[in-house]
Image (tube, grey):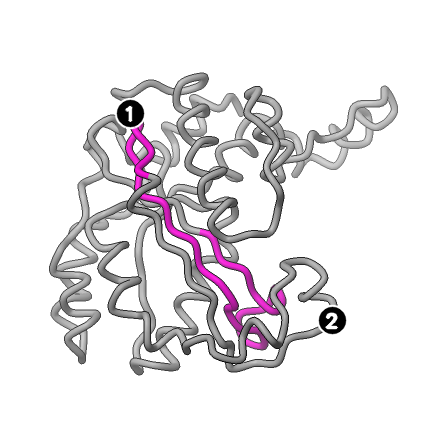
Amino acid sequence: MPALKRSRLQSVHAPDWPGIFKRLEAEATGPLLRDFYARGTVSGDTPIADVPFVALDLETTGMNAERHGIVSIGLVPFTLARIRCAESRYWVLRPRRPLSDASIAIHRITHEDLRRAPDLGEILPDLLDAMAGRIAVVHYRGLERPFLRRAVRERLGQGIEFPVVDTMELEARVHRRWKNGSLARFFAGLVGRHPESIRLAQSRQRYHLPLYGAHHALTDALASAELMQAQIAWRFSPETPLREIWH
């Protein structure tokens, strides 16, 4: 399915996030989440050029939100026109689940680094304030959203919901269009065609963006912000309505 046609199909079923936030505000049992939802979110009809974004990245002790925890968070506010590096935030956090040797090897955050690190609950007011009113941009929403939902639920008794733009999914619209067709995949393999990587570094390379070190939450958040700016410039337009790209 062509990317544009698929995008239009998705927009028909785009969620009403402003309406969802009003409902969640009414259902919130504590002030932190109530205030977060009260600050609202832009509608899906808003041109992307007018949307305030915040790039978000987590480093975790593993990939399963039910069994692993968050060890660092990076946030970078931005718009299509400007990345606000001076307003970025970065926290190293003490997870409630133990570090593994494998996770230390990936993100290089050690037990010593975490000895005096705060629990996520201690920085949650600052985190929610930095996210409120902005659309989160992540590279693979299957990690950031479930991990934050679980972590917030453990500390506040309710999980958190918020819209995201997933830069990995935007790449998949172009580079993984035939992934569900087994016959198409078979013939592609016969002629030496293999799906292009949609990992963050490889996706950035296609837009001639510089190579950054991986698995640092703040650097990866910046990398995701730059990638989304490039994706919009190359394959969408500033006037594209937000509903075409958010979830």
Secondary element under disc 1, as helix, strand or loop, is loop
- In the image, 23: left or right of 204? left
Q: Is residue 115 above or below residue 5?
A: below
| Residue 69 is covered by the magenta coloring | yes
Q: Residue at x 55, y 24 (%)?
A: 209
Residue occupying image coordinates x 19% and y 48%: 41
Above or below for 62 versus 142? below
Residue located at (44% from left, 59% from top): 73
> In this rendering, would 50 be left or right of 209?
left
Disc assigned to residue 101? 2
How far is the residue under mark 1 from the one under mark 2? Answer: 40 Å
Is label 2 in a helix, a strand or a loop?
A: helix
Question: Does residue 35 belong to the magenta stretch?
Answer: no
**Residue 193 x/y as whole percent:** 79, 23
- Dividing the picture into quadrants, the one containing residue 63 is bottom right
Crowd class of label 2 (few under 14; some 14 to 19; many from 20; radius 10 Å): few
Tag on residue 174?
A: none
Query: Which residue occupies the foreground of this view, 173 or 31?
Result: 31
Q: Amino acid at mark 2?
A: Asp
| Residue occupying the point 18% across, 80% down | 29
How far across and down, in percent of the image, does residue 82 sit?
Answer: 30, 29
Q: Is residue 86 above or below residue 59?
A: above
Residue 4 coordinates in the image, percent (x, y): 43, 21
The residue under label 1 is: 81
